Amino acid sequence: LTVDSGAADHVMPVGWLLMFLVVKSLGSIRGLHYVAADGTRIANRGQQLVKFMTMDGVWVDILFQIAAIHKPLVSVSKLNEAGYKVVFDEDRSYIIHKKSRKVINMRKERGVFIIDAFVPKNPEQGFKGRR
């Protein structure tokens, strides 16, 4: 998952994570669009609640908007609104929930900050084995 300080919403590409139900969102009902860096308009096609586990064993639920993009984007502004603090630093980058103090570590790859995560094949069952 790419952490993006310029993204207005958490956005997941169309057709990814088919194990999670995609439902209509307020944006898709209203016909809202996102605008890519090159000015291209990208339609909001609904939303899906995604449950995943980070490499550090932290369970996270994020409501992603669905659009024809190339990679999942996690919005820094949406994280802030949800009670998270996001720290970008050369030594250590992380996201921390202000109340629970749960930490999600990020790594930097080619100038982009990434959250590594596991997604269960069957969301109802979760993961088998160590948590």
Image: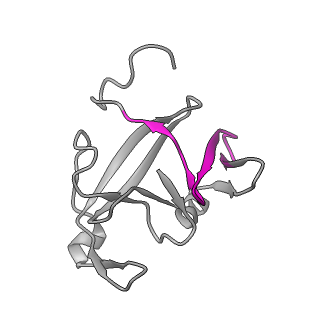
Number of disc labels: 0
- Residue at the extreme front: 110
Please tell me whether residue 77 is drawn above or below residue 74 in the rendered image: below
- Measuring 57% from the left and 67% from the top, which residue is drawn there? 5
Please tell me whether residue 101 is drawn above or below residue 121 in the rendered image: below
Report the side of 93 relative to 27 (left or right): right
Q: Nearer the viewer, residue 98 or 57?
A: 57
Which percent across, then down, holds residue 51?
40, 39
- Measuring 22% from the left and 56% from the top, which residue is drawn there? 23
Report the side of 72 relative to 40 (left or right): right
Query: Magenta span covers which residues?
Result: 94-119
Q: Quadrant of residue 11?
A: bottom left
Can residue 122 be found in the magenta stretch?
Answer: no
Which percent across, then down, holds residue 90?
75, 54
Q: Main secondary structure of the magenta part?
A: strand
Q: Quadrant of residue 82?
A: bottom right
